[in-house]
Amino acid sequence: MVATVQTLTAHEAGIETTAAEAAGLSGDMFIFANRVVEKLIGSEGLSGEQFETAKKVQDGFRTSLLEVLRGKLGFSDWFNSTKTNLGLHRTKLLQTLYDAITGLKDEELKDMQEFISKALETGVM
């Protein structure tokens, strides 16, 4: 099997994926999702059962964020659910998303970053 650039990039970001799962998403999208979950649900310093639990929670949030990027889940639904489940203020979650896009080149993510920037400035999504 020949690996695609998306698969290699996702794998390099520490995300296990197959070429079929990567279809339609850029490597930057996988990096973005990984950055977001690492920031929201850190596993550094955890060990044993706590580490495994954190990884499972991260996987769930990563999967749902990738579903948003695939267009299978609405951004507002994901945002509100994540904000509620993690007890985050909307500004903190928006800033986390904005920061996770910084330095990536994917045009869809850049558009998302612009949308988030306006939401941070105006308070309206």
Image (cartoon, helix red, strand yellow):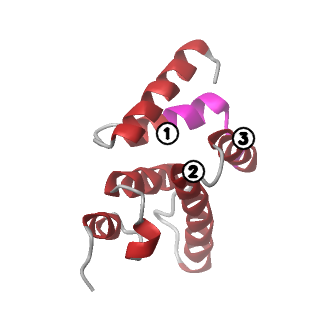
* Residue 22: % across, % down: 41, 66
- Are the residues flagged by discs 1 and 2 in contact, CB closer than 8 Å? no
In the rendered view, does 123 fall on the left or right side of 66?
right
| Quadrant that contains the N terminus | bottom left
The structure residue drawn at horizontal position 49% and vertical position 49%, both measured from the top left corner, is 36
Give the amino acid type for the residue marked by disc 3 in the picture: Asn
| Mark 1 secondary-structure assignment | helix
Read off the residue under disc 2.
71
Give the amino acid type for the residue marked by disc 2 in the picture: Gly
Instruction: Please identify the quarter of the rendering in which residue 88 is found.
Output: top right
Report how far apart the C-alphas of labels 3 and 1 lie in the structure: 13 Å
Q: Main secondary structure of the magenta part?
A: helix
- Please indicate, yes or no, whether residue 16 appears anywhere in the rendered image: no
| Label 3 neighbour load within 10 Å: few <14, some 14-19, many 20+ | few
* Residue 73: % across, % down: 65, 51
In the rendered view, does 43 fall on the left or right side of 49?
left
Name which of mark 3 and mark 1 comes first in the sequence: 3
Residue 29 against residue 109 in the figure, above or below = below
- Are the residues flagged by discs 2 and 3 in contact, CB closer than 8 Å? no
Give the amino acid type for the residue marked by disc 1 in the picture: Leu
